[in-house]
Image (cartoon, rainbow, N blue to C red):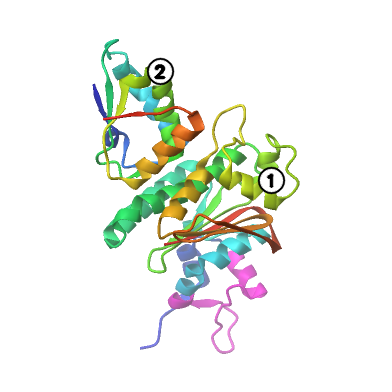
Amino acid sequence: MRIELKKFGTTLISRQAGKEALAAFQSSLAELKPDENLEVDFGGAITFSPSWGDEFLTPLLNQLGDRLILLPTDNPSVRITVELLERTQDKKFRRA
Amino acid sequence: MEEKLLTITEAAEILGVSVDTLRRWDKSGKLVAIRKEGGTHRYYRQSDLEIFASDLVKLAHDWINDGMELPVTFYCSNSSIFQARLAKMQDALMRSGTFDFILPLIVAVAGEIGNNSFDHNLGRWPDIPGIFFGYDIGKRRVVLADRGLGVLATLKRVRPELKNHLEALRVAFTEIVSGRAPEARGNGLKFVRQVVAENPISLFFRSGDAELRLKKDNDQLFITRSHINTHGCFAVIEF
């Protein structure tokens, strides 16, 4: 399954918005098969911050582990955010 | 051609403050009105209002110190208003077409500093809730300020051994720690530091009597004592 973050907006900044996005995504997540991966597509998202990322990506990483795959992006706000989340969680995201 | 003078009501509407505030600002010299010869009514030049509203650093600084009414353009009373204005800034930066690679980083840094103000002060604002948020794309500057608890009081809840504002700023920008423990959160300022260290963006940040400067493309922290004591936080981002 692939999730396009741009569907949640182009400015992914606040904790509240990250939390709401995760809640909205739960019904789709329920359809993910036990052996299926979830790919996160950052295309079209302009600004990405640790607050939003921590509310959305961190719970997914804890829940899915290696089944969560981050697709490549040139966006520097994504790269620095993902690195910071890895340091705070002491866990690595799987990259495609 | 002589510039048309605006009445005090028109000026109040443009700045988004009350007429009483403009009268107070006139008396205190903060924004001096014009009086026609022999008259008592106050008038304003549009250009004077623009100059007044463009001094973001002074406006934010004065608000932190005296808590007087702010032009409504710069006041975000809650996080939703801040998010909406941040998205507007992102659009304006995109329209300018000159920032390209660092655009998401400018928005994210401003977002994290503003979010921090709301996240750490929610339900605990000492007097006026909300933040000052202003930007000037021409001058390549963003200014944020709050009248919240400040970094030391926030971090002391999880780091009671912190002795002063200088130590608090160092911890906030370097160590993975949460001011909202036991929740694992509150590391936005580490993100800010890394972004500045790797990009042509600089930051001035003051809380209490401590000032921190992060310089463009430099990962060193310059923390010094300030002669000004700021309640809450005050930040200037330049890019």
Q: Secondary structure at mark 1?
A: helix
Residue type, numbered disc 2: Gln
Q: Which residue is mark 1?
A: B152
Q: What is the x, y in percent for residue B17?
A: 54, 61
**At 69% across and 45% down in the image, what residue appears?**
B152
Tell me: residue B230, above or below residue A49: below
Dot 2 crowding, Cα within 10 Å, few <14, some 14–19, many 20+? few
In space, the residues marked 1 and 2 are separated at their CA atoms by 34 Å
Residue B68: which disc? none
Q: Secondary structure at mark 2?
A: helix
Q: Which residue is mark 2?
A: A63
Dot 1 crowding, Cα within 10 Å, few <14, some 14–19, many 20+? many
**In the image, residue B31 lies in the stretch drawn in magenta:** yes
**In the image, residue B2 lies in the stretch drawn in magenta:** no
Q: For this rendering, which residue is in front, B106 or B218?
A: B218
Residue B67 as seen in the image, left or right of residue A95:
right
The segment highlighted magenta reads B19-48
Q: What is the x, y in percent for residue B187?
A: 53, 39
**At 55% across and 81% down in the image, what residue appears?**
B34
**Chain containing mark 2:** A
Residue type, numbered disc 1: Leu
Farthest residue, direction top: A34
User: Which image quarter is the N terminus of chain A in?
Assistant: top left
**At 29% across and 63% down in the image, what residue appears?**
B98
